[in-house]
Amino acid sequence: MKIHTDFSGFVNAKKPIVTIGTFDGVHLGHMSIIKRLQELAKEIDGESVILTFYPHPRMVLYPNDHDLQLLNTPEEKAKLLEQAGINHLVVYPFSENFSRISAFDYVRNLLVTGIRAHTVVVGHDHRFGRNREGDFNTLLEWSEMLSFEVEEITAKEIDEVNISSTKIRQSLLKGDIATANAFLGYNYELCGKVVTGARLGNTIGFPTANILVNYPYKLIPAKGVYAVKVKSGEKTFNGVTNIGVRPTVDTDGKLSIETHIFDFNNDIYDSSITIEFIARLRDEKKFGSIDELKNQIALDIQKAKELL
């Protein structure tokens, strides 16, 4: 897959079949659109193209009040789209000036002149241009004049999939990892740098890797204890992750993400690891003593090993 931040790389793109969207999560609902994109490309010996925007429009339009929580970092999204078989990903710069572009200029400048779209595939409720003035009917109206074709993903087709990024976010924020993973079609992940913590885990016999997520808009699942897979370098390990404020031992209230990796004693400080969420074991809980905490951690590990 080729990634573009301008249109210079489209000089040799063959009969581009393009769709537009955020594609946050690259979930099973998105895959139905991607599949149709690829079917159309195959029929005419063309290439599939996804047009998306960065920064996220809400970051630009509501810089102080967007409360943005995303399922993917830009790198994760690109990797998932590549795995899905997309030929081109266009990450077009979004700005205040761009938000004011008319629907006609949007179509002419981006889709026709920039991408040279053969076919544009959009959902029934897709809107674009200044004040969201453009829609499917607008595209249909201009398609003959500007020499491209249009295909609509109908409400019925979208409703049949019944999956949205919003539903996945809601599931993760409730700690419902099973539902989120089922909707995604893969296990939800957090990637971050291993940083120095309070080292309490070492003192109670359960050393942990403290993870600093390096993308500020990445959604963190609900507080609790999870069975996880841990990717470090080229290897994958089993483990348990606690997301929370460590109420038994801490009083500062800061959220931490700590992972105890089974059968692992390598020094991984300052390296990046990826946590793959498999199942939620329990809520975070305040215990009456360190011994009670240690006993519960042992039970969590036993349960996680059984699940994994």
Image: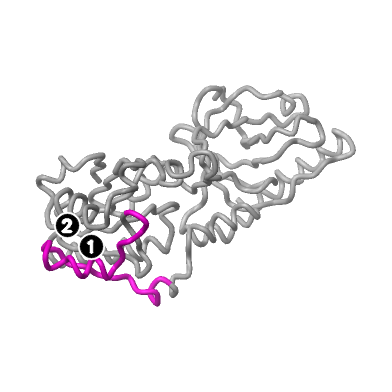
* Residue 132 sits inside the magenta stretch: yes
Q: Secondary structure at mark 1?
A: strand
Q: Are marks 2 and 1 in contact (CB under 8 Å)?
A: yes
Residue under label 1? 120
Estimate the x, y position of residue 173 in percent, counting from the top left.
62, 52
Residue at image point 54% right, 34% down = 213
Is residue 57 positioned above or below 161 on the image? above
Is residue 274 positioned above or below 179 on the image? above
Residue at image point 34% right, 42% down = 94
User: Real-space Cα distance between discs 2 and 1?
Assistant: 7 Å
Q: Which of 158 and 62 lies nearest the eye of the viewer? A: 62
Colour setting: one colour
Instruction: Say which amino acid is labelled 1.
Output: Val
Q: Which of 308 and 67 lies nearest the eye of the viewer? A: 67
- Mark 1, Cα crowd under 10 Å, few <14 / some 14-19 / many 20+, is many
Q: Which mark is residue 117?
A: 2
User: Magenta region, mostly helix, strand or loop?
Assistant: helix
Specify the farthest residue to the right: 288
Is residue 23 positioned above or below 193 on the image? below
* Residue 21 sits inside the magenta stretch: no
Instruction: Say which amino acid is labelled 2.
Output: Ala
Estimate the x, y position of residue 275 in percent, counting from the top left.
54, 41
Q: Is residue 217 left or right of residue 286?
A: left
Estimate the x, y position of residue 232 in percent, counting from the top left.
50, 33
Q: Secondary structure at mark 2?
A: loop
Chain part drawn in magenta = 130-158
